Image: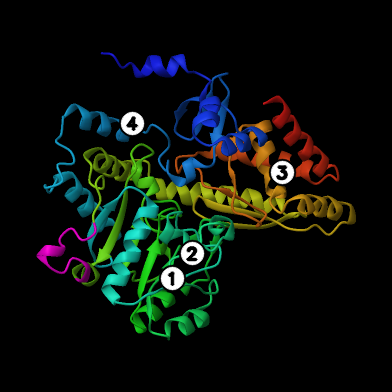
Amino acid sequence: MSFDLAKLISDNAGRGMQLHAQHINPRFATVLRTIGFDNNYVRASGAHLWDDRGNQYLDMLAGYAVCNFGRNHPIIRKALTDCLALDLPSMIQFQAPPLSGLLAQELKRRVGRGLDFVFFTNSGTEGVEAAIKFAKCATGRPALLYAPKAFHGLTSGAVSLNGCQSFRQGFAPYVPECRLIAFNNLSALETALAARDVAAFVIEPIQGKGVNIHSPGYLQAAAQLCHKYGALFIADEVQTGIGRTGSFLAIDQEGDVEPDMVVLSKALSGGYVPVGAVLVRGEVWKKVYSSLDRAVVHSNTFGQGAMAMAAGLASLAAYDETNAAQNARDMGALIKDGLEAMKPRFEMLKDIRQRGLMIGIEFGAPKSLLLKGAWSALHAMDENLFAQAVVIPLMEDHRILCQVAGHNQDVVKLIPPLVINQDDVRWFLSAFEDVMVKLHRVTVPLNLLARLGRNTIFS
């Protein structure tokens, strides 16, 4: 055969950054070099990565919560190779493929709540877009509600529901009648709903940007208020779903929450093939697909592709096989306990927000005079630098991959694969403690600037 993928990869080993800078996104390539994330990974398994020098890394990012069951999980890999070997007639379009029907049936079984139908997408963002359209069509209303710091995707409709200005800036005008309401505030929600022109309240059960958690009972009461005023309640479980928070859905831990739609993606892919799903209440679905001539009024080309559906089915099998939700609860609790034990020693360690293996580590201004100076110096240079002062040495000194949780929040987020074990937890806690010791020195601004400068000059 004329195309040899293995040879192509081998011939271009180590050229990823160069190719990216030349042909895809030079700004992002510069960011990676500056923060020391320009590694050339050549192998991945479970919760670990290896670079071309043989160094092993602990992945506490999981591809933005995509690889819940670890990278290259054997169940998912086998399902996809089997799918290719079967020579299935994928994407005929005028067809009702059995794999999508089986995946929809399995999702309904696990989610329940009277969500009768499933629309398949290629991403979480696309799922949010579908939910927006369904809500407007089903209610005949124009308005959508969203929360500060919310993140629902980056397409035009989804970005109109984002509560972070850094993702919105430059992309106005937004979808009309998208209204910001106070976070975790039932009174503000009821006031907004009382206008009776709201189609839906779109909400993450736990916010991905910052790992902000609502008060107990809020989500259940919010859904009830939506229904009282004729609006729909849409749970964006793209990041929180499929075991991340210690249950299949995050709303499973929130009492009797009755969503009209649940949006899933990320982990449903198994880390291989993009796939998303919107589970929809029957009465909503029937108002959208209301007649034979509207049978494909909302559709897509790739939404029910055989590889995507096989990946989804295999990912649910991997979820069961790894006991992912229980391990998320167990390992998440170990990490939280370890971090809480450090708080008395490190005055800039302010708060630990945790649900399963979705963890936000928030930092705050110190009380001691000398550390106040270091804190103020970093924030004067850039509001996001302090969190980077944690993330960069975790990578460079300890080979741990994690992320800043959002702009201007002083939060580092952990969303590792749900298959991490106690050794991985010890690796992270030991590394984090070392970083904290060094951060609680007055020289931290100079040290960080030295790292950034070195990475920029020698990259």
C-beta proximity under 8 Å, tags 2 and 1: yes
Label 2: how many residues lie within 10 Å, few (<14), some (14-19) or many (20+)? few
- Amino acid under label 2? Pro
Residue 74, numbered circle: 4
Quadrant in the rendering for residue 152: bottom left
Q: Residues within 10 Å of mark 1 (few under 14, many from 20)?
A: few
The residue tagged with tag 2: helix, strand or loop?
A: loop
Which of pointers 4 and 2 lies earlier in the amino acid sequence? 4
Labels 4 & 2 near each other (Cβ < 8 A) = no
| Image quadrant containing the N terminus | top left
Q: Are marks 4 and 1 in contact (CB under 8 Å)?
A: no
Mark sitting earlier along the chain (1/3):
1
**Disc 3 designates what residue?**
389
State the residue in front, 327 or 384: 384
Q: Which mark is residue 173?
A: 2
Residue ID for mark 1 = 176
For the record, the magenta segment spans: 287-298
Q: Say what amino acid the circle numbered 1 marks.
A: Pro
Which element carries disc 3, helix, strand or loop?
helix
> Disc count in the image?
4
Tell us which disc is closer to us: 4 or 3: 3
Indicate the position of residue 299 as horizontal and vertical percent values: 23, 55
| Residue 407, quarter of the rendered image | bottom right
Any part of residue 423 in sight: no
Percent of width and height locating residue 64: 48, 45
**The one of 132 and 388 positioned closer to us in this rendering:** 132
* Residue occupying the point 24% across, 46% down: 301
Residue 206 colored in magenta in the image: no
Asked if labels 3 and 4 touch by Cβ distance under 8 angstroms, the answer is no
Q: CA distance from mark 4 to mark 2?
A: 46 Å
Residue 110 visible, this orientation: yes
Residue 434 x/y as whole percent: 73, 39
